[in-house]
Image (tube, helix red, strand yellow):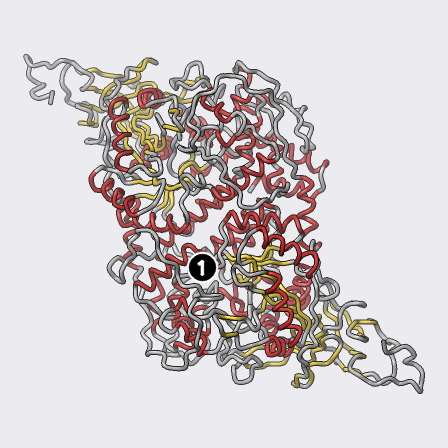
Amino acid sequence: MSGQGYQGKKNIPRITSDRLLIKGAIIVNDDQSFCADIYMEDGHIKQIGENLIVPGGVKTIDAHGRMLMPGGIDVHTRFQMPDRGMTSVDDFYQGTRAALAGGTTMIIDHVVPEPGVSLLSAFEQWREWADSKSCCDYSLHVDITEWHKGVQEEMEALVKDHGVNSFLVYLAYKGVFQLADSQVYEVFSVIRDLGAIAQVHAENGDIVAEEQRRILEQGITGPEGHVLSRPEEVEAEAVNRSVTVANQTNCPLYVTKVMSKSAADVIAQARKKGTVVYGEPITASLGTDGSHYWSKNWAKAAAFITSPPLSPDPTTPDYLSSLLSCGDLQVTGSAHCTFNTAQRAVGKDDFTLIPEGTNGTEERMSLIWDKCVVTGKMDENQFVAVTSTNAAKIFNLYPRKGRIAVGSDADLVLWDPDVTKIISAKSHNSNVEYNIFEGVEVRGAPLVVISQGKIVLEEGNLHTTEGCGRFVGRKPFSDYVYKRIKARSRLAELRGVPRGLYDGPVCEVSVTPKTMTPASSAKNSPAKQAVAGAQPVRNLHQSGFSLSGAQVDDNLPRRNTQRIVEPPGGRANITSLG
Amino acid sequence: MSGHSYQGKKNIPKITSDRLLVKGGRIVNDDQSFYADIYMEDGVIKQIGDNLIVPGGIKTIEANGKMVIPGGIDNHTHFQMPYRGTTTVDDFSQGTKAALAGGTTMIVDHVIPEPGSSLIEAFEQWRSWADEKTCCDYSLHVDITHWSDSVKQEVDTLLKEKGVNSFQVYMAYKDFYQMSNSELYEIFTFLGEMGGIVQVHAENGEIIAEEQARMLEMGITGPEGHVLSRPEELEAEAVFRAITIASQTNCPLYVTRVMSKSAADIISQARKKGNVVFGEPITASLGTDGTHYWSKNWAKAASFVTSPPLSPDPTTPDYLNTLLASGDLNVTGSAHCTFSVAQKAIGKDDFTQIPEGVNGVEERMSLIWEKAVTTGKMDENMFVAVTSTNAAKILNLYPRKGRIAVGSDADLVIWDSDAVRTITAKTHNSAAEYNVFEGMELRGAPSVVICQGKLVLEDGNLHATSGVGRFIPCTPFPDFAYKRVKARKQLAVLRAVPRGMYDGPVSEFSPMSRGGTPSASARTSPTKQPVRNLHHSGFSLAGKPAQRGELQLPFNLPIRFPIPGCHRKCQEPDTHTHTHTHTHTHTHTHTHTHTHTHTHTHTQQSAITFYNALHT
């Protein structure tokens, strides 16, 4: 540790960027803004206030009254992602450089284990890639690409020993990653027991597969086939289904890549009904639309390929940024996953083979500022919430990340709301030839970026260090998410009705169950079912039922004095019967 | 034919109930009510009006100003249904007697083929059971319990030759009747092409199976486990999914047994978005609720077991009646499927084994009158619509059924809106020991029922004859559903973008599919057709070539192109290119502009739906 005895005259330490003072900034958190100086040392914020007593000779930045905000957290990246022997062109070095250039000081990448490959070994592989190359702090989501007993054990290990608290399941990619509803139910049950977050890629893969075939049969092979075969209804359907399963299992849900108005609407409605669900629009869905799939330039059209696709409805970005502003959507990512044209061209004769993903990690902060703050939809505090704080809260990084406070990590951005720039592939930090925001003029950009207490962007120059990014482990049972889940679990104990044995006649039946009432099917996968009382895992909606045990008026066809209690978060399906 | 020279004095024919005059009634159709006499002969309405010239000596019924309504059509029954070697207690004779007693003069039963067996054989089996016993006219829905090319062939035959135009699929009953999403897609696609109506039993069977296992593990084995393992969210989820698939395949959808508020809400939302979807609440969901599953009397609790279950929310019946009155739900059935207590007791130790079904065919009309008309939610015309006319329209039997008009079948009910009776198993016409509406007092009942031109209920006496009921064949492409579907089909042609060949470099890649981009999976059955719904036809708007930053790109190809099938002049908005880029206000403005352009080139209807597609 440096910095002991720094007041001593003879002991002036080497002046490194480990110590940094920012003077005259407006500090912007998600709850308030205020003027103060801020002193950081060893990658942490040590002091906030006026007239700070700091070591002599520390590097000082004068903010001139500009906004200083927590560095952005990009909750969804796919750097260096393998796809059929190819790798996306931005590796962890290039990707995190682009992130830092845009004011994002932490990324959370997705580990995508190939089906058949152990989650743990895939996780270690990603760790290795990222540790050697990442320029900023990072964390990892792990995708569940298949489901069996071993996967459950590995999930437990990942949560307990490896700092993972979020898992993504796919409702699309039939025959590859897609899980059946019953598997999703079991995965969600496990996730809830572990205190993690269930993330979902929401598209109905069965219908997508049918539509893809149909579109190909019609001779449509270009990128427009991608969006035609994945209409937004199919996205909304899958969001609705995953919300239903999450409600049933009392598991918190996080919908990645909210791309369409209808999907966002389903999330907004579910939140109004009390579901613990979060929606993540991405840079692309907030900033552009799917009309480009019809570009006559194949390479350009292909550059927009991602799933769920960008909506051809040009009012979508505006709508999604409104929902982000009002809190119906909470978090933003980039889903940055870039392939160059030669890689995309793998699907030149068949759109289903085009590797998927768009850029956005560098543009995310500026684009949201331009779309939401400049337009007056949100203030700078809400901007901090959706670009950083909410992500930190959901994924249990708060207040270490996502807040400017004493003790928090020194990941900061000095924001210039007046600067304008034109996004272009010529000047961006990604390796990809196309930028889907090409030519978009955005107002608002980082002036200085500080990551781990070091200046990484100043005067337009990036000073990043490959491999200095640390893996940030995340603990389960994030308060922001699980306080409500726990309360609901406690409420939701089920009991049977105590009845005498039925001793009347019983009809003879043939042995095999025939029409109408099949026996419940055998379980083929490992979710442990809760034993009565031991792990009350009901959601609140069902909780009222035990009150109805008292059947004082059982001879009457209807009870006249029913008290209806709407449980918080309750659909009105089950009510307490007084 | 009798009745040639009926004015001749010496030739007075046998006075049969084949000729009937109803005098002084107020005729109620779904569109209007008016006073007139009705003369019918040979089971058909021959004349309507005042001072009719009719043969002498015919039987005349004085309606005394009471309402005369088209006989009810119960669009959902399960009479004589086989269940694991036993049969439901109401066969076609008993069941149709109960129907007639309640003012229903036609039923539509469900044929349920065993998975793996022939649909046509099952259909013929049901035909023979019904022909032998029914006391009123009937039609049949056929349930598709498995799917293959041969089933598809049979469906084709049933549609074209056998008089079936509606087929039910199950999203529940995992590993048994349940269809996968891909199968649903194929069935919907096929029926959408052939002019059939897809009916769906909407519940998520995957999750139910999980929940059932969980309940049983927790030691909950009684009937309350039934409703606990089938929460209404699972019904709503499946309805939502079915609507999505129907919308993708441009196929009209009919949701059987709408049991919960949330499921009904999904249907009304979808209708607002323009989906062709019909919802069928049943007598039970309109009249009672699921609190009875917690009855300490096992037999009573078990008598309420049906799927989707009755909702434990006691405000459900009122809510569903309101939606029925507002037109968000359209049709009513009873899903009458009755088992004796001994049969229900098959599941005394395991609720998943309880045979499912409730009564309701006899109570349906009175119950809706009581809940919806006496409360002022709907008028008598709407009552006729939801109990008879809408069903006839969907079945493509209108105006033969569902309307009082010259040439229509003489299936009539004289309705006594003041009659009050109390429902009880002691007096009902079903053979079941329990009645789920036990003790309810209902206002409104049939005082006279005429079926096939014959008096079957008069002065409280039922004169039904087994075996007189005829099978009424239903033809495909009912206008009520298909006019819109056809219009959308015409609009929804997809075209590829004409591009030059990509001739740049192509990366090496391993052919096996992984990491994000699977190849399309193999087909199990060959459905191909252009069936887009209108929502997707909106895509042509997206051809809108106001591309951001197009000018900066090296490949500055002309991207403005007329999209065939898009009737908009795609060439015109050259000046939009730059303004469109930066501000949302402009984006909005353009959208509206184009929408209005459409108004001129398309029909009003499609323009509105376009608008909806863009703004929902």
Q: Residue at x 62, y 40 (%)?
A: B611
Residue A245 vs residue B51, the one in the foreground: A245
Where does the image place residue B597, in percent across and percent down from the top left? Answer: 69, 33
Whether B569 is drawn above or below B552: the answer is: below
Relative placement, left or right, of A69 versus A298 is: left
Residue A250 vs residue B31, the one in the foreground: A250
Relative placement, left or right, of A52 versus A427 is: left
Q: Amino acid at mark 1?
A: Glu
Q: Which residue is mark 1?
A: B232
Q: Residues within 10 Å of mark 1 (few under 14, many from 20)?
A: many
* Number of marks: 1
Residue B38 falls in which quadrant of the image? bottom right
Residue A82 vs residue B125, the one in the foreground: B125
Where does the image place residue A578, in percent across and percent down from the top left? Answer: 37, 70
Does the image show residue A31? Answer: no
Residue A25 falls in which quadrant of the image? top left
Does the image show residue B551? Answer: yes
Q: Residue at x 29, y 33 (%)?
A: A122
Q: Residue at x 37, y 22 (%)?
A: A90
Image quarter where the N terminus of chain A lies is top left
Helix, strand or loop at label 1? It is: helix
Chain of the residue under the numbered disc 1 shown in the image: B
Where does the image place residue B599, in percent across and percent down from the top left? Answer: 70, 38
Where does the image place residue B344, in percent across and percent down from the top left? Answer: 44, 74
Relative placement, left or right, of B263 versus A122 is: right
Whether A465 is drawn above or below B183: the answer is: above
